[in-house]
Image: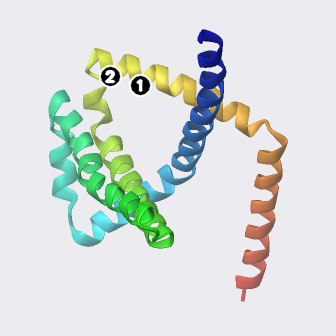
Amino acid sequence: MKKALLFLTAPVRWLLAWVVALVILFEEWGWEPLQRLLRRIVLLLRLQRLEVWLQTLPPYAAFVALAVPSLMLLPAKLAAFALISKGHVIWGGLVFIAAKLIGTAVIARVFSIVQPSLMQLAWFARGYSAWKRWKDALLAHVRSTRAWQQGKAFKASIANQLRKWLRP
């Protein structure tokens, strides 16, 4: 029985590692651009006072401010899975992707504002440091792969081609 359980846990761990890696890569790709986009939206909507207020929050209030966007988007993600389970795969996928993009943008922006306050919490600082080391090691490994290098070269060639086409 124990051997069968070990047999099952290795594939599950492998699958989980791939899912986590894909999420990290998505957030690594999207974190900065989405944060910049949200900053522009904040300026457009004149919400700078909200950002100033977030900067003044004490550590645990900053933690709550970071958690709220995730909790607010949970119903949208659950609705996406409900749509998928009812056979509306495209709509469910679109809702999930939209929720993920919005969530990543908001969380990236809020985190950049409240991070100094959060780092005053010893448990958060330890957890964040461990997470950052693990994520950086994973990204270094992924970036060293041939597939990543080829993808990076392909992206650069597409960008160069677009620049040529868009030049007057």
Residue furthest out toward the front? 1
The image position of residue 86, as x and y in percent, is 41, 66
Q: Which residue is mark 1?
A: 128
Q: Is residue 150 left or right of residue 1?
A: right
Q: Nearer the viewer, residue 146 or 79?
A: 79
Asked if marks 1 and 2 touch (Cβ < 8 Å), the reply is yes
Whether residue 161 is situated above or below residue 71 in the rendered picture: below
Q: 125 left or right of 159?
A: left
> What residue is drawn where x is 41% and y is 52%?
104
Question: Which quadrant of the figure has residue 85?
Answer: bottom left
* Residue drawn 26% across the image and 50% down it: 69
47 left or right of 126 in image: left
2 to 79, vertically: above or below: above
Q: Give the vertical position of 131 relative to 74 (above or below).
A: above
Residue 58 seen in render: no
In the depicted structure, whether residue 58 falls above or below residue 95: above
Q: Which residue is label 2 attached to?
A: 124
